[in-house]
Amino acid sequence: MKNTLLLLFVTLIIRVSYGSSLLKIEEVSNTSFIENTKDQIEYLIKENSNKKQDEKWYIYLVGQPVDTLKYYIDKTTKEHFSTSYLKNLNDDLIKINALNNVAVYVAFTDYENKILTPILPEDVNTLNEAEIYINSLINTKSKDYTPNELVESKKHFNTFSKEFQDLIKQVFTEDLISKMGKPNIVLPFSSYSIRQVIQLNTVEYIEKEFFTYTFYTPKLDEAIDKEALKNIYVTTAPNVGLSEEEQIISRSIASIYRYFTEDITDYLRCRDLLVKYQNEAILNDFPEFATRPEANPCILNYVVPWGEDKEKSEWMSITEDLINIPLYAVMAIPLTSVAGVATVEELSRKQIEKACKAAAIEVFSQTLVNYWFEESVYSEIDSKMRWEKALLAVNKPEVFKETLKQFTEISTRNEVVFACLNKGVAYKNVDWENLDFEKASISFSLKDCGNNVLNYVFFEKIGGDAASYALKKMLTLIKSNPRTFVKVWRELLEDIGPDFRSAARVHTTDILKAINLKADIDVAVEKYIKSSFHVEDALDDAIKAYVKEVNGTANNLFENAIKDAAIETDLAIYEAHGVMMNGVGRKILKQGANVSLNFKVSGREVKIYATLLERLDDDSYRIVFVNQPSSGYGTVAEFINNTTKNRNVVLKALIDGEISFYPTAKGVNAGKLEIDGKEIEIAEIELRTQRSDGAFKKETIVSKRISNDVDGIYANIKKNLENPIDEAQWQKFKKDFHDVDELSRFAQEPGLVDSWRYIGELKPSGTSKLTQDVDFLQVVYRQRGNPDLINKIGSDKYDDIIKNYSGQCKGCDAPASSASEAVKHLPPHDEMLESLEAFTTKHHGKDGFDKVINYLKSTDPRKQKGAEFVTNALKRQDGVTAFEFKYLGDLDNTADFVLNGKNIDGKSWSVASSIDNIGNWNLSGQLKDYFKSDQVFEQWFDYSRFQKSANETYSSMSKTDAVEHIKKQYQKLFEKERNAQELFDYITDNGENIDKFEAIFGENISNVDDFIDDVISDLSNSDLYGFIKVK
Amino acid sequence: MFVKKQEKKGGRYNSERDIIYTVKFLNDKAHIDFEDYKIEIEKKEFGIPFFWEQYFIVSNPNSKKVNIFSGANFVKNLSGFINRVNKEYLILSKKVGSNRSLNILNEDFNIIETFDNSWAQWFINADVFIFSEYRNLNTLKVYSFRTKSIVEITVPLEEWSSLDGEKNKNRIYQTIGQWKNELLVFIGKFKLISFDLETGKELWRLDDFLKEKSSNPIFDLPSRNMSGSVKWHLSASENKGYLLVQNCLFELDLNTKKSQLIKDYNESTEQEWYFKNSRLYDDCLTFSGANVLGKFPMVAGVIDRNTKEILWTIKCEPGIYFEEAPQIKDNKLYILDSSQTLRIFERELP
């Protein structure tokens, strides 16, 4: 018996793998830590001695005062734990502490402690290894981190491993241990901390949350056999707990109980089997299999010689090599016809039962996964048919593989699924021997199964098994149809039920990590998925509550439309350059949902809920309402008339200028935006209506304005003018503007009158209606009030752009039919200027910027169109380094711009007169040079030229159709024999460098015939046409 | 480090023979001069020129005709074309009607093996020849010169969609080479897969060998350009692979199956570098590239493999770029530019 204070930390399960500091050494005095902890334990020992068996308590909180413990005992529903978790866990502890030979007290900490660490390699997964790794960095004088950072990191780890251990030692004095009165004392810890990970070569830190689990054993009869305990742990299911963290502690308790009550000699015998088979193929030739006996050597008990007389299939051969009963038993289910019934009968009936059970569990788990994540199944509307399709889509090889995995491990997942199979699932006509579902039917009742089955199938062990069937299916769906994935995800979270929903959300990060999004999908898709997850997490409850308040009941369609709107906003925030072009072009900083706003109407407070509330970069806010998809209210007016009474009152009062745009925000959701109780400024109120393609139509319901009295507005405007106006001009102004809505905008911002005068002077004739375009005047006013912007563009150039621009204003007459296509296709002035502003903000100072401006101010509409296209296409584009870029030294070989190293030409060509003539042109030297040099090159075609074309065939084309159309025109150019030969000869130096050609097109093309046959003719797959993009 | 010695218009350098030959076109003839020999052939029959054993072979993919010379003497011609050889065999591509075939020729130029309906050639060394059937580039066929047998490797090439619905399909970009008994293959999305040359089975893979840098958009290379920009150099004896891409040097440790960023050339110097083509030598790497993102490869240079520092560079005149990385032999450096001028440099004495 060892009575010494043995300090033994057994790392049981390592979720994040390495240890952390448990407390802020600097802030919590050692004395109070020790005293507090001792007080708690003494309190528990004393209290427990006077309590009935089922009222005892064995959980404490290290370092906290005893009052806190009392609080926890009284309120075991603290948000860190699921409902009744502590109570149920304590019930397990009561059971274990009833044993004579062991005392177990569980410690939780929830200090939000910060600990520094460099980025550790994946295989460094224990505290000791982390320390060794940091030491090695220090010793090798790593250039990736500063010496100070490394020393600091080491100090933090030492703090944990030395000081904390000392503290624990001081808590568990001989005196205290003797009070526990048991020969073995085991103390599991669960600690939560925040770790700051030092970035390579930067001073920035990433914050990550970490849970760690340790055992401290201050007193033991004899040393714990770590491997035996570990083995018990692997085969023990948690009794309580929803989250992984809760379950790990529960499993630990159950494992300790088993360790001290069960005979572990069986396990020790199993361990000898590892030695016996150490040089055999079973442990050496099948790495995937070898990890299983290493975790649980007892499965080697099932290894038996394989009979000589069995037929050999490929599967059989593998089985024979493994000579493993579990696998064999699993195989026996579908292979009775191959191996013979007699073979199956030779096996232990118990093993077969277990295997059948495992296989049935796997079949059903797969069916569940298919029901949600198999695209062809999900698209089935009829629920019964959907289940049957899900069953039919079961992947048999995966069943075999997964069955083997599940067979040797007890898990809550399996028990839950099996319970569901007994209660809520009925199969008919399944040919189990051959796993044939062709004639099968299935009925399923989630209610009878309990929605915890979804939680266990989809979320248990997410991080641990990246290759699981569910994750693979999720990734496949994300790749093929990300929007459907988001829909499915929502449906699943809905079906999983409120008890498990929050637990499922906790795993979002693990799921994204396990799916390994980045490796396989487009960056835009990755951002979209991440944004959708973020919105679901951050705003879900608020949106749900909102829909219930507005509708009186849940409405998934409406809820999803709001979430889709929120995802778009979140994407804009995420990409940090989301300029929402809906009248007020501003960056959105943050969004909230279902925020209560109190407006004052006629002296009383009227409360409305903002569906979404967006904080803009000037600290004003935009209220966003989302039209209910099934409402049929298409217009703003219809929305106002049919919305809630309070909204109707507030919106009308705002439109009529009767109330101010400064409501007071209230409540929890306002608190999340840090505006609870504060007066905020509303810049505008917007209505979003979701179209069938998922995108949103955005309309302004009202923006800040005043008063409804025309004469009053005129007077107001004139009174507030900064620059005096003569009577003739004033009369002209009054002639131009008499609509209340328009005038209220001038009243709101009298400086618009200056814009009106400025435009009138620049364009004294010919385009009189341009001066009456208030949207345009608004943009001009804002831009001219921004001296930095005007300086960047150049004041004279800004004037010239407005003077020469050939686009038509919104209220202007349509261009004459004789006007050029360029004129007809130019967007209105305000849109052009908005693009120019965003473009200038983003790209001023880069090489060639002025050349784009010069093109835009040209008097030639074709040049204007080209420059307008470039400004519009690039206004939010990161990675642009230069314009009018000379790619071959100082010679006049230019690309319109460079984007992330790609040289790109903007082609704002007319479809009918230019694109459709490509086939008649000569091969351009630029195109040939690019192909030959293997330089990245693209041509960006202007989609608006298709959209605005008078020819309906073109105007109805999608972007994808447009790309195909342009490809066909280039194909006409390339397939002309002389062109094909010229291009081939040029790229290959007359056939001398054939490898270069192959490298570019990847098709092992070796002569011009193959070039025509295999590359030019292959519009859909050939890399030849990859340079064609439509923007 | 190197000083310019000579420029040869139409010059070509052959490192195995260590000779320079020139190719000039006059009227309909191609004039090839090397050592003391002069060969004249029809311009339309000129194509891929190379030295093999005692022969000088000119193969033209368009006329599908191979002319074989010994010294200046015409030996024979063959129908088809040749652009891959090892020390013992030549691979002759033939197209008869719709049948494309690959044929192994022995030293007497006799066909000893034919693979019908086969066209794409990936790799050849002393042990194996790797090819694909016509229009079936997902499957690599590994022919063993020793056993005369073929093992098939099915390369997993996935498809994916971008958010706007554009479909993308992965493809093989480089059969990097043989290491021990493994074939290393680079497919798009920066994946490297190793296959067992005897069984064809996948052994291991790296899912994103540029992961330390691939979040940077300039590494987001479109597929057309991939092979030009990303080309691994295998050093089987060192159990290493090297990759010079954009502004970075990566090293692949074949023992640990890990790739690592060794040096980012834009981090520590004022001069930016964007590498394009490269070659691996025992003590150095040579490259062509640009100092400005987006420019054609108008600079070339030499990197010391020990220190990873750039030792020497040269720049093109405007309008001209370097098509390849420099070749080095003994004390000389050769580089061909886009005007088909071979520039020859000599190492400076210390």
Image: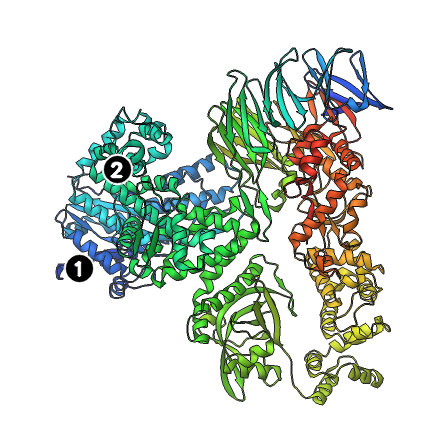
Q: Secondary structure at mark 1?
A: loop
Residue A224 visible in image: no
- The spot of residue A122 in percent (x, y) is 43, 40
- The spot of residue A647 in percent (x, y) is 52, 80
Q: Amino acid at mark 1?
A: Lys
- The spot of residue A290 in percent (x, y) is 33, 33
Q: Are marks 2 and 1 on the same chain?
A: yes
Which labelled disc corresponds to residue A1015?
A: none
Q: How is the image coloured?
A: rainbow
Residue depicted at x 85% and y 84%: A728
Protein chain holding label 1: A
Which labelled disc corresponds to residue A56?
A: 1
Residue under label 2, please give it: A227
Q: For this view, does A445 lie left or right of residue A829?
A: left
Which is more foreground, mark 2 or mark 1?
2
Q: Quadrant of residue B262?
A: top right
